[in-house]
Amino acid sequence: MVIGLLSAVAAVLYGGTVSVLAFTATFARRPALRRAARSTLAVLVRDAAERRGAGPLA
């Protein structure tokens, strides 16, 4: 039960982080902030895809 709860909390935190980064990458006023958010988002999404076995994303 505790492991399930921790997994659920981790999933919510990951989803929230990805959502905030996606909004920042789209709507930030400063180009430097948009670039930083996009690069961080790319790292998070790429790592998750590779762990699922999707292979490296180009």
Image (tube, rainbow, N blue to C red):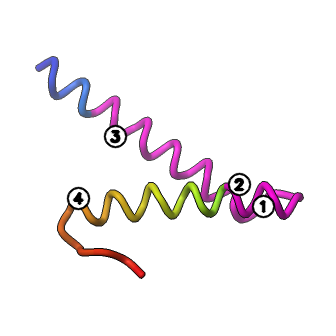
**Rendered-image quadrant of the C terminus:** bottom left
- Give the magenta part as a residue range: 8-36
Q: Which residue is mark 4?
A: 51
Mark drawn on residue 11: 3
Q: Secondary structure at mark 4?
A: helix
Please, which residue is most extreme toward the bottom here?
58
Q: What is the x, y in percent for residue 14? A: 42, 42
Mark drawn on residue 24: 2
Q: CA distance from mark 1 to mark 3?
A: 24 Å
Q: What is the x, y in percent for residue 38? A: 63, 63
Single out the mark in the foreground, 2 or 4. 4
Predominant SS along the magenta part: helix
Q: What is the x, y in percent for residue 9? A: 34, 29
Give the amino acid at mark 1: Phe
Q: CA distance from mark 3 to mark 2?
A: 20 Å
Q: CA distance from mark 2 to mark 4?
A: 25 Å
Residue 53 higher or lower than 36, as above or below: below
Q: Secondary structure at mark 2?
A: helix
Q: CA distance from mark 1 to mark 4?
A: 29 Å
Sequence order check, earlier mark of 2 and 4: 2
Give the amino acid at mark 2: Thr
Give the amino acid at mark 4: Arg
Using residue 30 as the reference point, say whether residue 27 is left or right of it: left
